[in-house]
Image (cartoon, grey):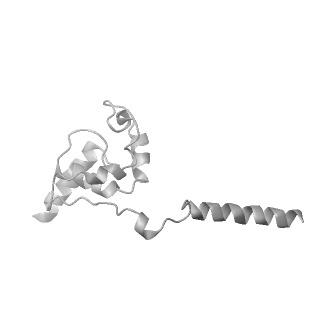
Amino acid sequence: MILKQLLVAVIDKLVVMMNSKTIMPNASETQAIPTYNPDTNPNDTSWQEFGSCRDKDPNIFFPEAGEDIAPAVRICSKCVVKEACLEYAITTKQPKGVWGGESVRARGRIRKARLSESE
């Protein structure tokens, strides 16, 4: 009897969750995550509204010289727009901060490697 009540309670909870769409929203209700394409619009920043950083303290991503960037890198590692963010920072030559999980130096190395590949 107790097992049956527990099972009914679990099923009821699942039905409520499904109806509130906390498990799987309909495809029509999900937004496409924008990408960054410097060839079509180098100033497009629409991808930023999907960034994991959007509700975090900006100081995490713009630390003072010598401060640890690991917290920013950790946040970026799970971000759905990490690639767009990194590409934007490389293309626009952002002089400061952690963008797409990479430091200024790392982005410089990526830029340099791309230039070498294109020669």
Q: Is residue 63 left or right of residue 8?
A: left
Q: Is residue 55 above or below residue 31?
A: above
**Quadrant hosting residue 114:** bottom left
Which residue corresponds to the image point at 35% horizontal and 63% vertical from the top-left? Answer: 32
The furthest residue to the left: 119
Give how far across and how far down residue 6 sits, in percent. Answer: 80, 62
Which residue corresponds to the image point at 25% horizontal and 44% vertical from the top-left? Answer: 105
Numbered marks: total: 0
Give how far across and how far down residue 117 sits, in percent. Answer: 16, 64
Q: Is residue 78 above or below residue 54?
A: below
> In the image shown, does 23 or 86 lie closer to the viewer?
23
The furthest residue to the right: 1
Q: Is residue 70 above or below residue 65?
A: below
Give how far across and how far down residue 71 sits, in percent. Answer: 43, 41
Q: Is residue 54 above or below residue 2?
A: above
> In the image shown, does 53 or 111 lie closer to the viewer?
53
Q: Is residue 112 left or right of residue 77?
A: left
Q: Which quadrant: the C terminus?
A: bottom left
Which residue corresponds to the image point at 15% horizontal and 57% vertical from the top-left? Answer: 41
> In the image shown, does 18 or 102 lie closer to the viewer?
18
> In the image shown, does 8 or 57 lie closer to the viewer?
8
**Quadrant hosting residue 95:** top left
